[in-house]
C-alpha cells in the first residue's frame, strides 16, 4: 500500500469513527467500563444535603466542625486490542475485507477509550506475536494503531489465537480490558481464554463474512484457503452442510464464552457494527 493511499484510508476511518464516538459511544464507554477503584480528591466542610456517613470524624475533631472527605473514581485503565492478522483476514465478499472492517471497529473502541483518558495497547498475532504496542494515551497513538491495523505485513499467514492469548498473559500484568478481534479460524483456544478472563475483562469480537455462512447456490465451486493455499471443491450439498455447521459453531462459541465470563459479540462485514457495539455497552451497563 502506498503511503499516500494508507494515510487517506487512516484519515477516512478517523473522520467516520470519531463522529460515531462523539455522538454515540463515548458516554456509553464510561458507563460500561468503570474504573478499578476510588482515589482521594479533597476535604471540605460539611454542607446541607451531604450524607452524615461521609463525615470524617478525626478531621472534624481536629478542626472543630464537621468535614467530609471527597473521592473520585480512579478512571485510568489499560485497554488492549488482541487482533488476528492471519491471511484469512484479507478475505471479503463485499465492500470491506475482514481486516478493514476489524480496523474500523477497533478505531471506534480505541477513540472511545482514549476520550475517557484510558490507555490503549495493541498486540497483532498470527500463529506468533507479530507486533506489540504498549498502552498509551492520545490521539496520535490511536492513529498509529489504525495504521498498523491497515498496513502491517505479518511474517506468518496462519492463526493460533491460543498463542496470542498466552503471550498477552505473560506480558500484561496489570488488570486490563482486552478486546479480541478475530474470525476465529484457529485451533482450540478454550483453556487460555478462561485463564485470560480470570485476570482481565475480556470481550471477544467474532468477525465473519456472509459468504462464510451461506455459500452461493451453484452446482459446485472451488475455494482456496488463504492461510494454507489448499484448494477444495465443494458441491451444493457440501455448501448447505457448511452453513449449518457454521451456525452451530457460532452458537456453541457463545455458550463457551458465557461459561468463561467473556462477552461475545458476533460481527458481520456486511452489517453496520455500531448496533452490536452499542448493544455490548447496554448489556454491560444493565449488568452493573
Image: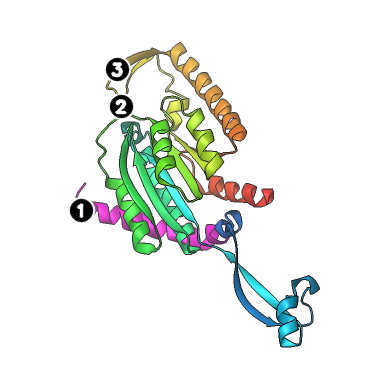
Mark 2, secondary structure of its residue:
loop
Dot 3 or dot 1, earlier in sequence: 1
Predominant secondary structure, magenta span = helix
Give how far across and how far down residue 259 sits, in percent.
62, 32
Residue at point 27% right, 22% down? 229
Whether 3 is drawn above or below 210: the answer is below
Mark 3, secondary structure of its residue:
strand
Give how far across and how far down residue 232 sits, in percent.
33, 15
Residue with the mark numbered 3: 231
Could you say which is closer to the camera, residue 141 or residue 57? 57
* Circle nearer the viewer, 2 or 1: 2
Magenta-highlighted residues:
1-27
Q: Based on the picture, tell me whether residue 269 belongs to the magenta stretch.
A: no
The answer to whether residue 105 is seen in the rendering is: no
Which quadrant of the structure image shows residue 94?
top left
Per the model, the C-alpha gap separating discs 2 and 1 is: 26 Å
Residue with the mark numbered 1: 3
Per the model, the C-alpha gap separating discs 2 and 3 is: 11 Å
Whether 116 is drawn above or below 248: the answer is below
Residue with the mark numbered 2: 227
Mark 1, secondary structure of its residue:
helix
The answer to whether residue 159 is seen in the rendering is: yes
Residue at point 36% right, 30% down? 159
Amino acid at each position: 500500500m502506498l503511503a499516500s493511499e494508507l494515510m487517506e484510508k487512516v484519515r477516512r476511518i478517523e473522520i467516520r469513527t470519531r463522529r460515531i464516538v462523539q455522538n454515540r459511544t463515548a458516554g456509553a464507554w464510561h458507563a460500561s467500563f468503570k474504573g478499578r477503584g476510588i482515589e482521594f480528591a479533597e476535604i471540605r466542610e460539611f454542607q446541607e444535603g451531604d450524607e452524615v456517613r461521609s463525615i470524617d470524624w478525626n478531621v472534624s475533631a481536629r478542626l472543630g466542625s464537621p468535614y467530609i472527605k471527597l473521592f473520585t473514581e480512579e478512571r485510568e485503565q489499560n485497554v488492549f486490542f488482541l487482533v488476528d492478522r492471519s491471511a484469512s483476514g484479507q478475505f471479503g465478499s463485499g465492500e470491506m475485507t475482514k481486516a478493514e472492517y476489524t480496523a474500523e471497529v477497533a478505531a471506534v473502541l480505541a477513540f472511545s477509550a482514549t476520550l475517557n483518558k484510558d490507555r490503549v495497547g495493541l498486540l497483532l498475532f498470527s500463529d506468533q506475536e507479530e507486533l506489540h504496542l504498549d498502552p498509551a494515551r492520545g490521539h496520535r497513538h490511536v492513529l498509529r494503531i489504525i495504521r498498523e491495523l491497515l498496513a502491517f505485513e505479518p511474517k506468518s499467514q496462519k492463526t493460533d489465537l491460543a498463542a496470542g492469548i498466552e503471550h498477552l498473559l505473560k506480558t500484561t500484568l496489570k488488570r486490563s480490558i482486552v478486546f479480541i478481534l478475530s474470525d476465529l479460524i484457529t485451533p482450540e483456544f478454550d483453556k487460555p481464554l478462561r485463564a485470560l478472563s480470570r485476570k482481565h475483562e475480556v470481550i471477544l469480537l467474532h468477525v465473519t463474512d456472509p459468504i462464510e455462512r451461506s455459500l452461493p447456490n451453484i452446482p459446485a465451486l472451488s475455494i482456496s484457503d488463504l492461510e494454507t493455499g489448499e484448494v477444495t471443491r465443494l458441491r451444493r450439498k457440501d455448501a448447505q452442510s457448511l452453513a449449518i455447521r457454521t451456525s452451530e459453531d457460532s452458537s456453541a462459541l457463545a455458550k463457551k464464552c458465557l461459561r468463561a465470563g467473556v462477552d461475545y459479540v458476533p460481527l458481520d462485514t456486511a452489517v453496520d457494527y455500531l448496533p452490536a457495539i452499542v448493544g455490548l455497552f447496554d448489556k454491560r451497563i444493565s449488568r452493573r
